[in-house]
Each structure stands twice: as C-alpha cells, then as structure tokens.
Image (cartoon, rainbow, N blue to C red):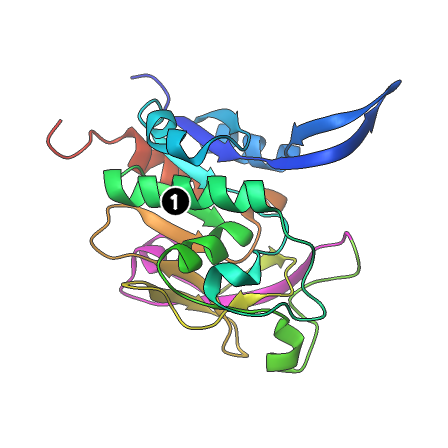
Amino acid sequence: MPKPLIGISTYLDESVRWGVWHLPAALLPSGYHRLVQRAGGLAVMLPPDDPAEARTVLARLDGLVVSGGPDVEPGRYGADPHPRTGPPAPERDAWELALIEAALATGVPLLGICRGMQLMNVALGGTLVQHLPDAVGHNGHSGPAGVFARHDVNPVLGTLLGEVLPEPLAVPTYHHQGLGRLGRGLIASAHTDDGTVEAVELPGAGYAVGVQWHPEAGDDLRVARSLVEAAGRPAAGA
C-alpha cells in the first residue's frame, strides 16, 4: 500500500537569504516534513495560493497539517489587535483557513499545530486570547526567543487524543496566544495545569485534531502517526 500523501502549509517570507541570494521564499522548518516522514507519510509543502483552489489541492492529498507560525489577524475573530500581537500574514491566513474549511467539508484528515490549532478554532467561529501571560500570569508556554520551553499537558480521557496519548506528558511549546471561546462543535482534549486548552478535536468529523504544542520539535510520534494512519484509511463511501 502506498504511503499517505500529507500536505503541510508553509510560511511566506519576503526576505530570505541563502548563499548569494536574498529573495522572497515559501519555507518551512524541516521538523515538519521530517515529522510526517518519520510517522510513515510522504510530505509535500503547500505554499499560500488562491483560497478558491483549496478543495482542488486537498483532492490530491490524503491528509493535511496546518503548521505553526505568526499570529492570526485579530479581525478574523472580531477583535482589535493587542499591543503584543504580531504583524498579520493575510495571504497565509486566507489560504490556511480555506484549507481547514475544505478539509472539514470533505473529510480529509486534519492536524493543526500551534497556529494551526488556533486557525481551526477561528474557522469554526471561536476566538483567541491574544497574549496568554495576561490570562495565566506566567510565561511558561514559551521559552526565550527562538527556544522551545517544555511543560506538561493532561489529555482528556474518552477523546480521540486521549486514546492516542493516554497519560500526561511533557511537550515542546512556544506560543504566547491561546484559545478563548471554542468554535462550533470543538471539544477540548488536553489542558495544562493552568487551565489552558492544549488540544481540540471535532467529534463526528473523522480525524480533525489540533494541538497547541510542537510535536515536530520532539521525539514523540504518536500524534503524527495517528494522522498518517487516518490518512491511510479508505474514505467513507470509497
């Protein structure tokens, strides 16, 4: 049986330097494609495109990862920018929201990582906490600039994620935003000790899971393998 083909959304950066070149680039930290490969899938990168093409792209894929990255533009969930919210990435927001909506509509297995989980929530009408330290009173969800922190998460038994991760575990983490009001149909499937939602899923949607942490920065392949396994199963009605 061929390996499932998993698309991973990418950054779009206007100024990247390599060798003698200094050019715009679509890019992705290598941890993402290596995570998919180590979990048994084939990885392809999905740079921002016309949102109208999202369903066409997904028709050629077996699964989707929406990767981490910049803060979601607050206007997309009806909020004004917080002073600590980063600059918007409108092309990426539009493309990834279209990918998420198409995946949910067509049943393509979906894993949102960090920003990807936050976009899943926004796509379903939820909101974000724009600067999590304001809400929880500490900076334990991220390390110094460019350094992952680690903290424990507690999966919720009886959820899909709770089946994949049946015990509390320490995870690599780097985020200053989190989920506010959950989007339509989403349930929380993991929390930290401070109450922050660390994973969500959409019951009845096949495989639609978001995690706030960064599995691509660690060695635990269980979440990625669960996505690849779901992507390898025949579609309903096939």
Q: Is 236 in front, or is 222?
A: 236
Instruction: Quadrant for the N terminus, please.
Output: top left
Q: Is 7 in front, or is 160?
A: 7
The residue drawn where x is 40% and y is 65% is: 126
Where's residue 200, x and y in %? 39, 60
The residue drawn where x is 43% and y is 59% is: 122
- Quarter of the image for residue 201 reads bottom left
Residue 72 is a magenta residue: no
Residue type at mark 1 is Ile
Q: Which residues are magenta?
A: 146-167
Residue 226 visible at all: no
Residue 108 visible at all: yes
Q: In the drawing, does residue 29 fall left or right of residue 17?
A: left
The residue drawn where x is 35% and y is 29% is: 58
Q: In the drawing, does residue 227 fall left or right of residue 26?
A: left
Query: Vertically, is 21 above or below 30?
Result: above
Residue furthest right as drawn: 20
The residue drawn where x is 53% and y is 77% is: 193
Residue 159 is a magenta residue: yes
Where's residue 63, x and y in %? 37, 33
Secondary structure beneath label 1 = helix
**Residue highlighted by disc 1:** 100
Where's residue 82, x and y in %? 66, 71
Query: Vertically, is 139 above or below 12?
Result: below
Q: In the drawing, does residue 33 fall left or right of residue 3?
A: right
